[in-house]
C-alpha cells in the first residue's frame, strides 16, 4: 500500500455549542495516495463539514488532520491548500474571475505559475470540460451546469495531488457526468491523484475504491462499493438490479437471496 | 393555465453586448394542468425557457402566452405582474434566495409584495409550510439555522404561498439526498394531482421524467427539438440516441435483457414496477 496522504484522527466538530449533538464526532480514517474515496450519507450527516475541515475552512473542537504528512493548523494551512483542489456544490459560491479563463487561471496566478504554462493548463482544463468556446464569457452568464464545468476546470488546472468533490456534478447531464468521472479516474491511474468525492449518486460512488458511510457525524460503515451496496440501509437507492430483486421478492417470486449485479441479474432471468 | 410559445427567440444583453440566441424559434405549447419535464444538455436553453414564462427573460422575437396574458418584444414590463402572480418560479438552489430573519417573514414576502394583507399572508404561510411537510414551530426560526433540505422546502413554500396556477421548477432535487429528493418530488406530484397545478420541471434525472412527468420537451441549442409523451420519447431509440439522452434505469435494463433474450418484451417498461409486472406476465421470473 502506498503512503497515507490524508489522516484524520478523532475529529470532532460542532457548529454551535448550544446544539445537542456534534456535527462530526470522533471521526478517524486514513486515505492513501492514489485512492478514490467516496463519502456518502444523508443531508446533515456531516459530509460537507468534513470537506471544509480538511482544507481548514473550519476549525475542529478536537482531533488532528494530517495532509501529506503535515499537520493542519493556522501556519500550515496555506501550504496544505496548495495540495488540495476542492469543488463545491454550488458553483456560484466560488467564482472570482470576470471571464471564464480568468476564473480558471485564478489559483495558478496565486501560485505564480509562469504565463506560458498557465495558458497551457487553462486551455487543457477548459477543453477537458468542454468549455473552450466560452473562455471569454462572463461566468455569471453561464447556465448552472456550465458554471459547474468551469469550477471543475479551475480545480483541474491547479493540478493538486488531492481532489475533493462536494456534490460537484449535480447539475450535469448523466452523459457529461460519466465522461468527467471517467477522466478523473484516468488521472488517478496515471498520475496517482487522490480523490475524495462526497456524493448522493450511487454511480459516482461506484467509481471509488472505498466508501465511507457517515451517519449523524459518525463513521457508520466503510468498505468497497460491492460491500456497501449490499447493505439494507443505504443513504441512496440501491443499484437498479437490487431494487428489482427486492421488488420481485415482495411480489412473491423466488429470487436469490444475495445481491446480484446487472449482468448476474440478466443471467438469472435468462437461466 | 396554458403556456404557449409562438416562435420565441431570446438572448441576453449585457450593456452593449448581446449573446447568441439562447432560445431559437421555440414553437410549442404546454397544456393547462399538465406535468411537463424539460430535459437536454447543459446550456441547451432549459433555464432560459423557464425564464421567458414569467418575463425574467423577455423574448426578442415571438410571443409567450400565459393564459390570457402575453409577453411580446416592445411591450415592456406591462402585464408582467399579473403573470408573475400566477407563475411560481423555483430556481436552482432556491435556498440561496432566503433572506428574512424568520421563516414566516420569508414566506410572507412574496404574497405581501403582490398586495396580500399581512394577516392573510401569514395564514397562507402556515398552509404552505404544512404542504411542504415542515412543522409550524419553524415559522419563528431563522431560515439560516435549517438544514439544506429544510431550507429548500421553505423556499418552495414561499412560492406556494402566492398560490400560483403554474409552478416552474429548475432542478429542485439537485444536491439533496435521495429521501429528501423523493419527498420534494412527491410533493410536486401532489400539487399537480390534488391542486391541478400546471408543472414545468427542468431535470437531468430520467427517473423523475419516467415516474412523474406526462410530457417531455427536449431542448437542444435553444430549440425545442421534441415535445411529446414521455413514453413516446423512450420508445424511440433513434430520438434518444440522436439527442444524446439517457434512458431510465428500468428501460436500460430492459434493453440489455432483450438483447440477451433475442426477443422483445411486450411493452416499454419505464419503472421497476412495470418491468417486474411484465417479467411476471411473460413467465420469465
Image (spheres, coloured by chain):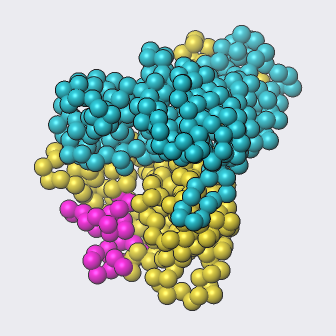
Which is nearer the eye, A93 or B3? Answer: B3
- Position of B105 compared to B52: left or right? left
- Position of B230 compared to A2: left or right? right
Q: Does residue B188 lie above or below A94 as drawn?
A: above
Asked if residue A52 lies in the magenta stretch, the reply is yes
Which is nearer the eye, A55 or A145? Answer: A145
Q: How many marks?
A: 0
Which residue is painted at 27% across and 77% down in the image? A74
Residue at the left extreme of this rendering: A18
Image: magenta residue range: A50-78
Which residue is painted at 44% across and 22% down in the image? B191
Chain A representation colour: yellow
Asked if residue A113 lies in the magenta stretch, the reply is no
Q: Position of residue B94 (x, y in %)?
A: 40, 44
Which is nearer the eye, A9 or B208? Answer: B208
Which residue is painted at 36% across and 79% down in the image? A78
Amino acid at each position: 500500500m502506498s503512503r497515507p496522504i490524508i489522516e484524520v484522527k478523532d475529529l470532532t466538530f460542532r457548529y454551535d455549542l448550544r446544539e445537542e449533538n456534534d456535527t462530526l464526532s470522533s471521526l478517524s480514517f486514513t486515505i492513501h495516495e492514489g485512492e478514490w474515496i467516496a463519502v456518502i450519507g444523508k443531508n446533515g450527516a456531516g459530509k460537507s463539514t468534513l470537506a471544509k475541515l480538511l482544507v481548514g475552512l473550519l476549525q475542529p473542537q478536537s482531533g488532528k488532520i494530517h495532509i501529506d504528512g503535515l499537520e493542519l493548523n493556522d501556519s500550515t494551512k496555506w501550504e496544505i491548500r496548495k495540495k488540495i483542489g476542492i469543488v463545491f456544490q454550488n458553483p456560484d459560491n466560488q467564482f472570482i474571475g470576470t471571464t471564464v479563463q480568468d476564473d480558471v487561471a485564478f489559483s495558478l496566478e496565486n501560485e505564480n505559475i509562469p504565463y506560458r504554462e498557465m495558458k497551457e493548463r487553462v486551455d487543457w482544463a477548459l477543453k477537458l470540460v468542454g468549455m473552450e468556446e466560452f473562455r471569454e464569457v462572463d461566468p455569471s452568464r453561464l447556465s448552472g451546469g456550465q458554471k459547474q464545468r468551469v469550477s471543475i476546470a479551475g480545480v483541474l488546472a491547479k493540478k493538486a495531488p488531492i481532489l475533493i468533490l462536494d456534490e460537484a456534478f449535480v447539475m450535469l447531464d448523466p452523459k457529461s457526468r460519466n465522461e468527467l468521472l471517467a477522466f478523473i479516474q484516468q488521472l488517478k491511474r496515471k498520475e496517482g491523484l487522490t480523490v475524495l468525492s462526497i456524493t448522493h449518486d450511487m454511480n459516482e460512488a461506484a467509481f471509488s475504491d472505498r466508501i465511507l458511510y457517515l451517519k449523524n457525524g459518525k463513521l457508520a460503515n466503510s468498505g468497497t462499493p460491492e460491500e456497501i451496496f449490499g447493505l439494507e440501509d443505504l443513504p441512496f437507492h440501491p443499484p437498479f438490479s437490487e431494487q428489482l430483486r427486492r421488488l420481485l421478492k415482495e411480489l412473491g417470486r423466488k429470487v436469490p437471496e444475495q445481491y446480484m449485479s446487472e449482468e448476474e441479474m440478466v443471467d438469472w432471468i435468462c437461466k | 393555465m396554458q403556456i404557449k410559445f409562438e416562435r420565441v427567440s431570446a438572448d441576453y444583453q449585457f450593456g452593449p453586448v448581446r449573446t447568441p440566441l439562447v432560445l431559437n424559434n421555440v414553437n410549442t405549447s404546454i397544456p393547462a394542468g399538465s406535468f411537463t419535464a424539460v430535459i437536454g444538455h447543459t446550456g441547451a436553453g432549459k433555464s432560459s425557457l423557464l425564464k421567458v414564462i414569467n418575463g425574467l427573460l423577455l423574448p426578442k422575437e415571438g410571443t409567450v402566452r400565459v393564459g390570457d396574458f402575453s409577453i411580446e418584444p416592445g411591450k415592456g414590463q406591462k402585464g408582467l405582474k399579473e403573470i408573475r402572480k400566477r407563475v411560481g418560479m423555483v430556481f436552482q438552489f432556491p435556498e440561496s434566495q432566503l433572506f428574512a430573519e424568520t421563516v414566516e417573514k420569508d414566506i410572507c414576502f412574496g404574497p405581501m409584495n403582490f398586495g396580500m394583507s399581512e394577516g392573510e399572508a401569514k395564514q397562507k404561510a402556515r398552509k404552505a409550510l404544512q404542504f411542504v411537510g415542515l412543522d409550524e414551530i419553524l415559522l419563528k426560526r431563522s431560515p439560516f439555522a435549517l438544514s439544506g433540505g429544510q431550507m429548500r422546502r421553505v423556499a418552495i413554500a414561499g412560492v406556494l404561498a402566492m398560490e400560483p396556477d403554474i409552478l416552474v421548477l429548475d432542478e429542485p432535487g439537485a444536491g439533496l439526498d435521495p429521501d429528501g429528493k423523493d419527498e420534494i418530488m412527491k410533493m410536486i406530484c401532489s400539487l399537480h394531482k390534488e391542486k391541478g397545478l400546471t408543472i414545468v420541471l427542468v431535470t437531468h434525472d430520467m427517473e423523475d421524467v419516467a415516474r412523474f412527468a406526462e410530457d417531455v420537451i427536449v431542448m437542444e441549442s435553444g430549440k425545442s427539438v421534441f415535445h411529446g409523451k414521455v413514453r413516446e420519447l423512450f420508445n424511440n431509440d433513434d430520438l434518444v440516441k440522436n439527442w444524446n439522452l439517457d434512458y431510465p434505469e428500468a428501460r436500460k435494463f430492459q434493453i440489455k435483457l432483450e438483447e440477451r433474450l433475442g426477443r422483445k418484451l411486450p411493452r416499454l417498461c419505464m419503472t421497476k414496477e412495470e418491468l417486474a409486472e411484465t417479467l411476471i406476465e411473460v413467465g420469465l421470473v
